[in-house]
Image (cartoon, grey):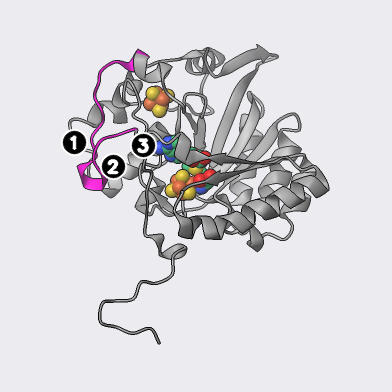
């Protein structure tokens, strides 16, 4: 089963489409499939998002649109993305995926979710008690809003589904190189997570953001990665035949960079926890 659902009057309907409204994140989850734990920067302007999806809406209609990142609540105009998506793709259900820490920066977000019949999914990222102390009140708040308003607010415990997509860390990153793309694709949890990035379509997040990740760590010439950088994303110049072929592809050579059997990470960790832990006292120093 590919990402393509059907095709009518020149418009291709897909299971889903994901967009980074920002690459910035407050948490740094080790092994994030979007490589967001490496401090990437840059955010999408609402006007650019409007231009991109207006143009794509002539040929593409996703059943689900996921606004992600990075952490989407770090974008000051997040509610505007919901109204824009609703206007341009009225039959698409828009989701916000969030780690929840900055929901309070968006007093108009709940109304925007109601107005646009959109949904929000909270990712619970750790079993660390300090983290839970911070996230539990947010979970409770969302539960209350769900009961009061009927808005579709969900949560997922991602520590139960965390898998590894590459070997090493940062400058030592390597593809798995199992050379079994069909197996990798069959077991992949990101296979229906097509990305709109730089106004082009990409198969999934690990492929879409691979270029910026390898550039950051000066790995673009690494012969182990080079074959996967040859991946062709799809632009608006594509013909209908090219669109159909792109969206119908299941496993393809680029899937060879991923593990044939993605290993579950039982002890998912988050670096640079300063954003939610109390500062540690240095040995020998007394708290003021
Ligand atoms: C990249 S995050 C962006 C949105 C937001 N920052 C969040 O964490 O929900 C989108 C989703 O990808 C999932 N994800 C990222 N890396 C993953 C991995 N290695 N294994 C499983 N899920 C992963 C996250 O758990 C989250 O639900
Ligand atoms: S919070 Fe989301 S975007 Fe940020 S590092 Fe974790 S999974 Fe990636
Ligand atoms: S390259 Fe293929 S196997 Fe790897 S994450 Fe993307 S769709 Fe999944």
Evaluate if marks 2 and 1 touch, with contact meaning CB atoms under 8 Å apart. yes
Residue stretch rendered in magenta on the structure: 165-182
Q: Is residue 69 visible?
A: no
Element type at mark 3: loop
Element type at mark 2: helix
Residue at position x 67%, y 37% in the image = 94
Which label was assigned to residue 214? Answer: 2
Residue at position x 75%, y 29% in the image = 91
Q: Please, is residue 138 above or below residue 246 in the view?
A: below
Residue count near mark 3 (Cα–Cα under 10 Å), binned few <14, some 14–19, many ≥20: some
Q: Please, is residue 161 above or below residue 28 in the view?
A: above
Out of 177 and 252, give the one closest to the viewer: 177
Q: What whole-number distance in Å separates the C-alpha atoms at marks 2 and 1? A: 9 Å
> Which residue matches tag 3?
265
Q: Please, is residue 144 above or below residue 229 in the view?
A: below
* Label 1 or label 3, whichever comes before in sequence order: 1
Quarter residue 272 falls in: bottom left
Quarter residue 15 falls in: top right
């Amino acid at each position: 089963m590919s990402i393509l659902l059907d095709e009518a009057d020149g418009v291709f309907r897909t299971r889903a489409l994901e967009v980074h409204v920002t690459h910035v994140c407050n948490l740094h989850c080790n092994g994030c499939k979007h490589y967001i734990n490496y401090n990437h920067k840059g955010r999408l302007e609402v006007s650019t998002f409007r231009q991109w999806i207006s143009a794509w809406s002539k040929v593409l209609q996703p059943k689900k649109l996921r606004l992600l990142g990075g952490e989407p609540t770090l974008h000051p105009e997040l509610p505007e993305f919901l109204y824009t998506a609703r206007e341009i793709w009225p039959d698409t259900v828009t989701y916000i995926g969030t780690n929840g820490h900055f929901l309070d920066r968006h007093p108009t977000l709940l109304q925007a979710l109601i107005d646009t019949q959109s949904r929000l999914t909270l990712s619970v990222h750790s079993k660390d008690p300090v983290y839970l102390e911070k996230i539990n009140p947010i979970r409770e708040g969302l539960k209350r809003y769900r009961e009061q308003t009927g808005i579709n607010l969900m949560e997922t415990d991602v520590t139960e589904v965390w898998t590894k997509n590459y070997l090493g860390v940062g400058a030592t990153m390597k593809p798995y190189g199992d050379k079994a793309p069909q197996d990798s694709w069959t077991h992949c949890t990101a296979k229906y997570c097509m990305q709109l990035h730089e106004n082009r379509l990409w198969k999934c997040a690990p492929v879409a953001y691979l270029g910026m990740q390898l550039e950051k760590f000066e790995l673009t010439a690494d012969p182990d990665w080079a074959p996967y950088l040859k991946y062709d994303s799809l632009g608006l110049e594509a013909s209908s035949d090219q669109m159909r072929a792109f969206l119908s592809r299941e496993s393809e050579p680029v899937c060879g960079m991923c593990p044939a059997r993605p290993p579950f990470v039982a002890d998912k960790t988050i670096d640079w926890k300063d954003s939610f832990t109390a500062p540690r006292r240095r040995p020998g120093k007394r708290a003021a």
